[in-house]
Amino acid sequence: MTFEELRLVKPLLDAVRDAGYKTPTPIQQRVIPTVLDERDVLACAQTGTGKTAAFALPILQRLAESRPPRRKDGQRSRRRPIRTLVLAPTRELAIQISESFSTYGQFSKLRHLAVFGGVNKNPQARSLRAGVDILVATPGRLLDHMADGVVKIDTIEILVLDEADRMLDMGFMPDIRRIMKHVPKRRQTLLLSATMPAPIRELAHQILNRPVSVEVTPVSSAAETVEQFAFHVEKNDKPALLASVLDNTAYSRALVFTRTKYGADKVVRHLTRGGVEAAAIHGNKSQNARTRALAGFKSGKIPVLVATDIAARGLDVDDISHVINYDLTNEPETYVHRIGRTGRAGATGTALSFVSRDDHGTLRAIERLTKNQLQPADDMPGYTAPEVAVHAPAPKAAKPSGNGSGRKRSTSRNSGRKNTRRRYRRGRGGQRKASQTSN
Ligand code: AMP
């Protein structure tokens, strides 16, 4: 199927071509015509499926093809009324959605804006007063602007709730319900969610009108192109293991997940001390710090990004070669989201999970959900046992610089821990591998 067959108009086809897309993804094939037909949509799809374009393209087309409805008094508003509201759980996702509207809407005259917390309200308020057609917002900041009387959403024709399950996890449901009271009853509504827990199904039932259900790649079957390995490790040895893994693996970009914000900062400090450029993104970082970290990661300047789950949601970075679960997540579905950051668009990727004693039950749950057993660390191609890194401080200067794609730096610090290796290394005769392998 082609984008032309989806009835998209020329400016959008041009934008899609400019973006380098050749064929619509499965969710785009289903959702684009449905939105153009003005039907409600309930889509079960995760990041990486092309879901943003699936709703942004037909919304741009619908708005471009019609004029905003008249006000109740029959007059047209002087300022542009907001015609589409997209609610997103995180600032990062809001920014990415807004960037997608810029990309796909580059040949249209529609204006869009993203508003989110953590930054000064005033510039956002000024832009809102100037009038926008499409508003992308995190729920809390939208309510702030509504309370200030800066924004009215009673003119909405299309409402999108993106990553609804994450909004639920983040405690946004009361905010969503408050916002719902202000949108018109007559509207088109799209609800997208990676998973469909009961409260989301209930919300869908309440706010959608005879929706068309679309499901692409059920979460448990995601990321078949990702090779998954388990490293059994004592909690205290995780920093040394991470340093060693990065030291011995050819990676282009590695995304490291920690359970807590504090943990993320600690990992960054540890890596930085060992000479690895790393940055953290999480909810306690200022918007500027997050944007800087993300830009560095995207440009390749910072090869290792350490993130908590919430901060990583919606992160759209191509070419992440390795996802490292420094802390395993208790939610198997989150595991699938995490590893879905690599191996995107058919590329291969590698996911490494550090499994400590307490994690065995979690690991079993993940393996049950994904119907896949994580491979032992020793089976990872090109991986050299962490002995060198853990036991002897590796000679910094003597290391080869890698094959161009790999980032090799000596990060070893743990010369004092003599017995660490046995705990997470399985078998292989115990030979000491001092040489570096980069594949
Ligand atoms: P999303 O699921 O919206 O986060 O999109 C994931 C990535 O897929 C983004 O980098 C998009 O630019 C990209 N993408 C979206 N649609 C297509 C397509 N039809 N062909 C190739 N890449 C696409």
Image: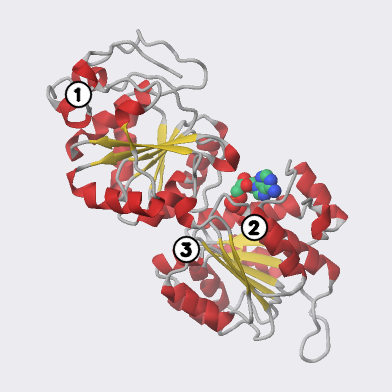
Badge 2 residue CB within 8 Å of ligand 1: yes
- Where residue 37 sits, quadrant-wise, is bottom right
- Please say which color scheme the image uses: secondary structure
Give the residue at the far top of this rendering: 398
Badge 1 residue CB within 8 Å of ligand 1: no
Asked whether disc 1 touches disc 2, contact meaning CB atoms under 8 Å apart, the reply is no
Callout 1 crowding tier (Cα within 10 Å): few <14, some 14–19, many ≥20: many
Position above or below: 119 against 263 = below
Disc 2 element: helix
Answer left or right for 341 relative to 15.
left
Give how far apart the Cα atoms at labels 3 and 1 are: 41 Å
Q: Of the numbered discs in the image, which one, if any, rests on residue 433? A: none
- In this figure, which residue is indicated by the disc labeled 3? 195
Give how far apart the Cα atoms at labels 1 and 2 are: 48 Å
Res. 414 in view: yes
**Residue 325 point in image, percent of width and height:** 35, 42
- In this figure, which residue is indicated by the disc labeled 2? 27
- Going by the numbered disc 2, the residue's amino acid type is Ile
**Residue at horizontal 83%, vertical 86%?**
75
Position above or below: 369 against 352 = below
Give the residue at the far right of this rendering: 10
- Where residue 376 sits, quadrant-wise, is top left
- In this figure, which residue is indicated by the disc labeled 1? 414
- Going by the numbered disc 1, the residue's amino acid type is Asn
Give the residue at the far bottom of this rendering: 73
Is 307 or 252 nearer to us in this picture? 252
Is 369 or 330 nearer to us in this picture? 369
- Going by the numbered disc 3, the residue's amino acid type is Thr
Q: How many marks?
A: 3
Answer left or right for 396 relative to 69.
left
**Residue 70 point in image, percent of width and height:** 81, 84
Give how far apart the Cα atoms at labels 3 and 2 are: 15 Å
